[in-house]
Image: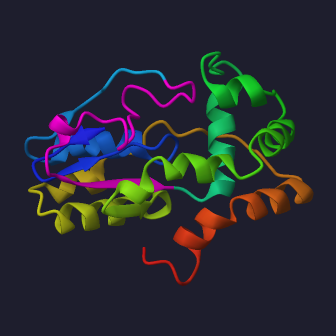
Amino acid sequence: MNILKNSVFYHIPKTGGTWVSEVLSRAVEDSQTYEQHYEDGHGLRAGHVTPIRINKEVVGGRKSFCFVRHPVSWYQSYWRYKNPTYWDKTNEIDVKCESPNFNTFIENVLREYPDGYVTWLYGQYAPYCDFVGKQEQLGTDLVRALDMFAETYNPDYIYETPMLNVSNGATAYTPENLKKVLEVERKVIDEYYSSNSNN
């Protein structure tokens, strides 16, 4: 996460936050990277501290923002990043759902998190943030957040910084798994990706 003069950036895993943090460190006056060490069993620790767990004295009265990503591509990115060598034996989703096969991983997630893992994950951050941007329009929404919170920044860094921590490779859903993911993650899809969403 990054602490700025007027706002705080909360980093939800696999939503472009590594890039955002790098841009903020370079482009925003007085940006400070912050890690709060704790372990919650879900892999949300250090730089992924949630608004609920953050030391309130560190945040002060600052506004806050985060980014989300469409659940369909979130699962693809997460699995590509983890497979084959980064499965974490202290992270609940990894322990319960690890698989070298993407669709087996999805089936494991659907079984273990019938209400949607991404819905749960975003619920640890987004409801507590003053602005929620989208990974799919990362640069544009970062500018919106910085302007909204009156941060002083150099816009050149935003458009010149290449994407970071990108997981490449093909990961195709079976039609049945895609349908199920869209069903269980309906809440966050409707909230952030429907034509009626505010962002």
Q: Is residue 142 above or below residue 26?
A: below
Is residue 61 within the magenta segment?
yes
**Quadrant in which the N terminus is drawn:** top left
Q: Is residue 158 left or right of residue 108?
A: left
Image-quadrant location for residue 94: top right
Helix, strand or loop: magenta stretch: loop
Percent x, y of residue 190: 61, 72
Residue ID at (80%, 43%):
106
Q: Nearer the viewer, residue 86 or 121?
A: 121
Residue ID at (31%, 25%):
36
Percent x, y of residue 77: 63, 43
Percent x, y of residue 41: 57, 24
**Quadrant in which the C terminus is drawn:** bottom left
Residue ID at (50%, 40%):
13
Is residue 46 within the magenta segment?
yes
Residue stretch rendered in magenta on the structure = 40-68
Q: Is residue 134 left or right of residue 54?
A: right
Q: How many marks?
A: 0
Q: Nearer the viewer, residue 136 or 183?
A: 183
Q: Is residue 10 above or below residue 127?
A: above
Percent x, y of residue 101: 84, 33
